Amino acid sequence: QVQLVESGGGLVQPGGSLRLSCAASGSIFSITDVGWYRQAPGKQRELVASITNGGRTNYAGSVKGRFTISRDNAKRTVWLQMNTLKPEDTAVYYCNFKGRITLRQEFDSWGQGTQVTVSS
């Protein structure tokens, strides 16, 4: 079983910054794609940013140029650096890890979510 633990959310003023982190633990053979998603009240969960095992990144248009995703495979950790935050970035942020527990068994795990509130 793979567990993900997130940290770093909180309340920040518009224009401020936050850094989210998510660490994976458990029986993991390999990790492939890792991503951050968010869900605002009354809205569907959406992809914010993702990064492949090779380091290729993908960002939602609304955060491009403001957010940066990075990962450390040895530490099984992913970060989301969020700069120039806007009130519309307010949401619960979830990390997602995909990979394999064994050569034959895949996993797709989610973090517990961390609240990010951007408000003056």
Image: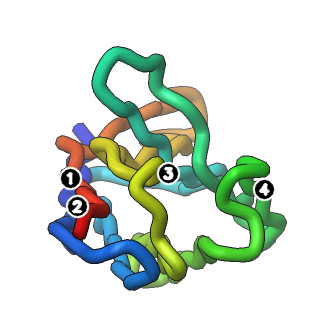
Residue drawn where x is 23% and y is 45% of the image:
113
The answer for how far apart the CA atoms under marks 3 and 2 are is: 11 Å
The answer for how far apart the CA atoms under marks 2 and 1 are is: 7 Å
Camera-nearest residue between 117 and 28: 117
Q: Which mark is residue 114?
A: 1
Graded by Cα atoms within 10 Å as few (under 14), some (14 to 19) or many (20 or more), the crowding at tag 4 reads some
Q: Earlier in the sequence, mark 4 or mark 3?
A: 3
Q: Earlier in the sequence, mark 2 or mark 1?
A: 2
Q: Earlier in the sequence, mark 3 or mark 2?
A: 2
Residue drawn where x is 24% and y is 57% of the image:
117
Quadrant of the image containing the N terminus: top left
Graded by Cα atoms within 10 Å as few (under 14), some (14 to 19) or many (20 or more), the crowding at tag 1 reads many
Q: Quadrant of residue 13?
A: bottom left
Say which residue label 2 marks: 6
- Foreground mark, 2 or 1, reads 1
> Is disc 2 in contact with disc 1, using a CB cutoff of under 8 Å?
yes
| Relative vertical location of residue 3 with respect to residue 39 in this rendering, above or below | below
Say which residue label 3 marks: 36
Q: Earlier in the sequence, mark 3 or mark 1?
A: 3
Secondary structure found at label 1:
strand
Say which residue label 4 marks: 58
